[in-house]
């Protein structure tokens, strides 16, 4: 077993960017691996459902080029988790195409591994029938028709597929959807380190310099030992502190001390944060408790077709009675849409009032609008794009040309910043699975494809 392993994460997500000087500094530390997490469910279900990447190919290619150069320079592995933002097959292939382009342009030679995470629907139905799936939280048990409706289903792999690719000699590893720490956990365990510090390091590295101050997308260096993790930012302008590291350790976890992962639980209740300098922190005391192996499923299904318009008003008379006005507008729009022969159950109108309660909606505790102007975002989601477009057009004209008590303006009520005012958004998706599937083999759901570049 190696005494220590050094690993680098360059940014929060592939394509978010990082300073080249920081990567150069990180490479001087002679890391055993460099990488970046590629995605998240935070941007919503659109990317998983549509197959489109979260960040542009220009953004991703810039980051990938620098990562590949660094990996080739030091002859170390480079790993990307959750490629393309959502980790489905289109996202994985988009990143693979960029890697091939860069390799051709730079004359690079390496063994590439592609780890697939998109799931076969027949496999999932068999798992349901066998009783191998269970819901998380308040979700209902997984049903076969939910599987059928899904535009795309991915499983969140653990570190084992990355570890298998490393053992197979791959230097560049691109993976579909996975639990965020997986690439770094795989590298640390590949070098013989125990799972507890490996998982803790992966948790900090998944968002890179979110564990440092001030927060920015930059490179984080983690040194993993048998029972500790040291972290420091590559950029000398940033620093890690016990507090900044603790805050990141709480990130995206229902419990402040327990984190469930494939195959076990990371327990941080006994962790000690020790500053080694004004910008380097050592964490010790983490524990790993094995558990039955489960894989979380993510899926997106089409919820309809969306069209939106945005307008604003600064009429104090209208702002003072905006709630009743909006209610009347929606009801009038329904009446006009019915005249077209479109049943109300075939679409829905959603209006958000920014400057009043656009962020929290009915949960907003401040009920009275205090702003001198209000932004109004109107959306219609319909069974078809044609229905959405028609219902939105009628909602927009009703917003623009409706009376209200005390109205003085005889023209329009709203200011529209865009022409055309109505914008098609296309298919709108919603997440449809909050479940795990129990498996015996951590590699079974994630086929690995090898390629010599």
Image (cartoon, helix red, strand yellow):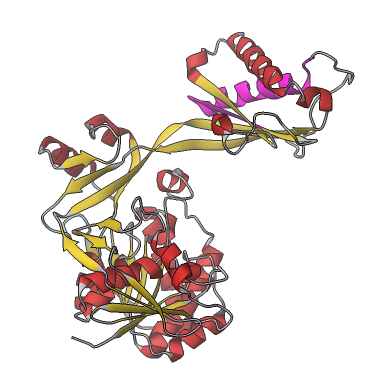
Please tell me whether residue 177 belongs to the stretch shown in magenta.
no
Tell me the quadrant of the picture where the N terminus can be found: bottom left
Task: Report the side of 206 relative to 112 (left or right).
Answer: right
Tell me the quadrant of the picture where the C terminus can be found: bottom left
Q: Is residue 421 visible?
A: no
To which quarter of the image does residue 445 belong? bottom left
Q: Position of residue 255 (x, y in %)?
A: 33, 53
Q: Residue at x 57, y 38 (%)?
A: 425
Q: Which residues are magenta?
A: 377-403
Q: Residue at x 31, y 41 (%)?
A: 434
Q: Residue at x 35, y 66 (%)?
A: 203
Please tell me whether residue 391 belongs to the stretch shown in magenta.
yes
Q: Is residue 432 above or below residue 6?
A: above
Q: Is residue 66 above or below residue 300?
A: below
Considering depth in this image, is 49 or 162 the residue closer to the camera? 162
Task: Report the side of 257 relative to 238 (left or right).
Answer: left
Q: Position of residue 250 (x, y in %)?
A: 40, 59
Considering depth in this image, is 7 or 123 the residue closer to the camera? 7
Considering depth in this image, is 66 or 213 the residue closer to the camera? 213
Considering depth in this image, is 66 or 263 the residue closer to the camera? 263
């Amino acid at each position: 077993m190696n005494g220590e392993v050094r690993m680098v994460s360059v940014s929060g997500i592939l394509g978010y960017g990082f300073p080249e000087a920081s990567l150069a500094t990180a490479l001087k530390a002679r890391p055993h691996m460099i990488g970046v997490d590629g995605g998240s469910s935070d941007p919503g279900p659109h990317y998983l459902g549509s197959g489109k990447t979260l960040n542009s190919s220009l953004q991703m290619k810039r980051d990938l080029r620098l990562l590949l150069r660094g990996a080739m320079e030091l002859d170390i592995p480079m790993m990307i988790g959750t490629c393309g933002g959502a980790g489905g097959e289109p996202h994985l292939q988009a990143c693979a195409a960029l890697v091939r382009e860069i390799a051709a342009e730079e004359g690079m030679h390496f063994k590439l591994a592609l780890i697939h995470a998109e799931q076969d629907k027949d496999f999932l139905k068999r798992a349901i029938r066998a009783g191998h799936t269970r819901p998380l939280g308040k979700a209902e048990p997984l049903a076969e028709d939910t599987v059928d409706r899904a535009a795309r289903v991915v499983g969140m792999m653990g570190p084992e597929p990355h570890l298998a690719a490393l053992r197979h000699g791959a230097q560049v590893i691109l993976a579909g959807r996975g639990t965020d720490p997986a690439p770094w956990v795989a590298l640390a365990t590949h070098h013989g380190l125990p799972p507890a510090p490996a998982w803790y390091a992966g948790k900090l590295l998944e968002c890179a310099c979110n564990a440092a101050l001030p927060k920015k997308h930059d490179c984080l260096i983690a040194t993993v030992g048998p029972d500790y993790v040291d972290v420091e930012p590559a950029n000398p302008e940033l620093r890690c502190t016990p507090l900044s590291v603790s805050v990141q350790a709480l990130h995206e976890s229902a419990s402040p001390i327990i984190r469930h992962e494939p195959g076990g639980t990371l327990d941080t209740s006994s962790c000690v944060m020790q500053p080694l300098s004004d910008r380097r922190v050592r964490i010790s005391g983490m524990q790993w408790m094995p558990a039955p192996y489960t894989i979380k499923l993510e899926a997106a299904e089409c919820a309809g077709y969306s069209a939106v318009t945005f307008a604003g008003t600064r009429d104090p008379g209208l702002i003072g009675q905006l709630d009743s006005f909006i209610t009347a507008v929606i009801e009038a729009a329904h009446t006009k849409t019915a005249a077209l022969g479109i049943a109300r159950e075939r679409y829905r109108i959603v209006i958000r009032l920014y400057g009043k309660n656009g962020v929290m909606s009915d949960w907003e505790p401040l009920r009275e609008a205090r702003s001198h102007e209000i932004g109004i975002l109107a959306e219609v989601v319909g069974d078809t794009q044609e229905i959405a477009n028609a219902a939105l057009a009628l909602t927009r004209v009703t917003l623009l040309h409706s009376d209200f008590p005390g109205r003085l303006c005889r023209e329009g009520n709203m200011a529209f910043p865009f022409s055309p005012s109505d914008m098609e958004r296309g298919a709108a998706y919603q997440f449809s699975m909050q479940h795990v599937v129990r498996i015996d083999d951590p590699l079974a759901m994630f086929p690995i494809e090898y390629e010599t570049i």
